[in-house]
């Protein structure tokens, strides 16, 4: 059974930092591109950042100067370091694991962790 478990969300003041973690089980972690998405109230889900099994990263333009994605292929965990947080970063953040093996795609989601940026 595949599980992605996020942690690290919470309430933080503007300008503060948080580190989200997503620990996976039931998958061959190194095969998967790991991503963080977020859904703000009243908005569609958007990609925050992604990292391939080999460590290549990709960021949404509005976040690449403040957020850093990384992964630990031994601990089967992906991280999102978020600095200089703004109220508009308030959202539920979701971890995603995706890969394609031949003609078959695999796509898994965590349950989400709430991040609230407010004074």
Image (cartoon, rainbow, N blue to C red):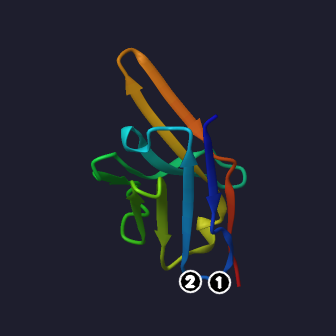
Would you name the residue on which mark 1 appears? 13
Which residue shows up at 55% across the image and 62% down it? 21
Which residue shows up at 55% across the image and 48% down it? 24
Q: Position of residue 63 (x, y in %)?
A: 43, 64
Q: Is residue 40 above or below residue 3?
A: below
Which mark identifies residue 85?
none
Q: Position of residue 88 (x, y in %)?
A: 60, 67
Q: Choose between 118 and 25: the one closer to the eye.
A: 25
Toward which corner of the image does residue 41 lie, by quadrant? bottom right
Disc 1 element? loop
Q: Position of residue 82 (x, y in %)?
A: 49, 71
Total tally of numbered discs in the picture: 2
Q: Is residue 4 above or below residue 117?
A: above
Instruction: Say whether residue 14 is left or right of residue 98.
Output: right
Give the spatial CA distance, label 1 vs label 2. 5 Å
Disc 2 element? loop
- State the quadrant of the C terminus: bottom right
Instruction: Say whether residue 9 is left or right of residue 26.
Output: right
Which residue shows up at 54% across the image and 84% down it? 15
How crowded is the residue under tag 2: few (<14 C-alpha within 10 Å), some, or many (20+)? Answer: some
The reply to whether callout 1 and callout 2 are in contact (CB within 8 Å) is yes
Would you name the residue on which mark 2 appears? 16
- State the quadrant of the N terminus: top right
Q: Choose between 88 and 17: the one closer to the eye.
A: 17
Q: Position of residue 22 (x, y in %)?
A: 56, 56
How crowded is the residue under tag 1: few (<14 C-alpha within 10 Å), some, or many (20+)? Answer: some
Instruction: Say whether residue 5 is left or right of residue 79.
Output: right
**Residue at the top extreme?**
103
């Amino acid at each position: 059974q595949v599980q992605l478990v996020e942690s690290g969300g919470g309430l933080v003041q503007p300008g503060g930092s948080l580190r989200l973690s997503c620990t996976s089980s039931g998958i061959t972690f190194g095969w998967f591109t790991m991503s963080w998405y977020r859904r703000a109230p009243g908005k569609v889900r958007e990609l925050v950042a992604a990292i391939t099994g080999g460590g290549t990263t990709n960021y949404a333009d509005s976040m690449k100067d403040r957020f850093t994605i990384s992964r630990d292929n031994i601990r089967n965990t992906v991280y999102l370091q978020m600095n200089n947080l703004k109220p508009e970063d308030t959202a539920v953040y979701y971890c995603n694991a995706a890969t394609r093996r031949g003609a078959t795609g695999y796509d898994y989601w965590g349950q989400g962790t709430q991040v609230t940026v407010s004074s």
